[in-house]
Image: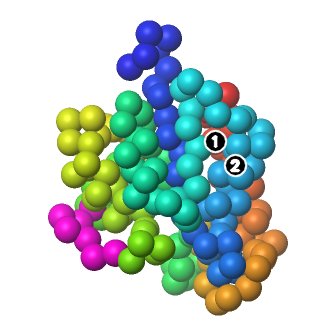
Amino acid sequence: MSSTGIKKTAVLGFGNPVRADDGVGIYVIEQLKNQLGESEHLSIFDMGTAAFEILFKLKGHERIILIDAVINTGEKVGTTYKLPASEVEGQIEDDPMVFLHSLKWNQALSYAKKMLRADYPKHIDVYLIAIDSTRFNVGMTEEAKTGGDKIVGLLLEELK
């Protein structure tokens, strides 16, 4: 932990902004960048681009926060979830098959764990926002945006 007692935190937003509500993770990190900016203790990454390059930049962070959309939950669009670390660890695959432009958070953590080894952060939180469509469409529904805004509010309080 840093000398000030503040954990160096990396916030990773996942999603595709041209796939309707799937872009809500990117929306959240854009809002955080605008309202908080980055600092010595906070890094904010768009995992929709250059994902593998970003994984190397996680070295030195003590905490990871991931934000993504989740489909087929049976809940209303915009419903938010926070997964405990035990759930996250259960999603990590030993050797995930991925396409370079469709890396999901559990795959990203799998690769980060292998690349960072002893430097892999111990504190991980995953925030998910329920959606029901990933069809090609620039822009999100108001419901997904409302869920994203809820996560933005929680993280602004926590990270300030």
**In the image, 51: left or right of 129?**
left
Q: Residue 133 location, x and y as percent?
A: 63, 86
Q: Quadrant of the N terminus?
A: top left
Numbered badge on residue 12: none
Side of 16 where 99 appears, left or right? left
Q: Amino acid at mark 1?
A: Leu
Residue closest to the far bottom: 135
Colour style of the rendered protein structure: rainbow
The quadrant in which residue 154 appears is top right
- Magenta stretch, residue numbers: 92-98
> Residue at the spot x=70%, y=35% of the render?
37
Q: Secondary structure at mark 2?
A: helix
In the picture, which quadrant includes the C terminus? top right
**Residue at 72%, 35% in the rendered image:** 36
CA neighbours of label 2 inside 10 A, class few (<14), some (14 to 19), many (20+): many
Q: Is residue 93 magenta?
A: yes
Identify the residue at image location x=58%, y=56%.
46
Q: Residue at x 41, y 41 (%)?
A: 58
Q: Which residue is mark 1?
A: 155
**Nearest to the observer: residue 66 or residue 76:** 66
Residue 139 sits in which quadrant?
Answer: bottom right
Where residue 153 sits, quadrant-wise, is top right
**From this viewpoint, is residue 8 visible?**
yes
Check if mark 2's residue and mark 1's residue have beta carbons within 8 Å. yes
Dominant secondary structure, magenta: loop
Q: Which residue is mark 2?
A: 152
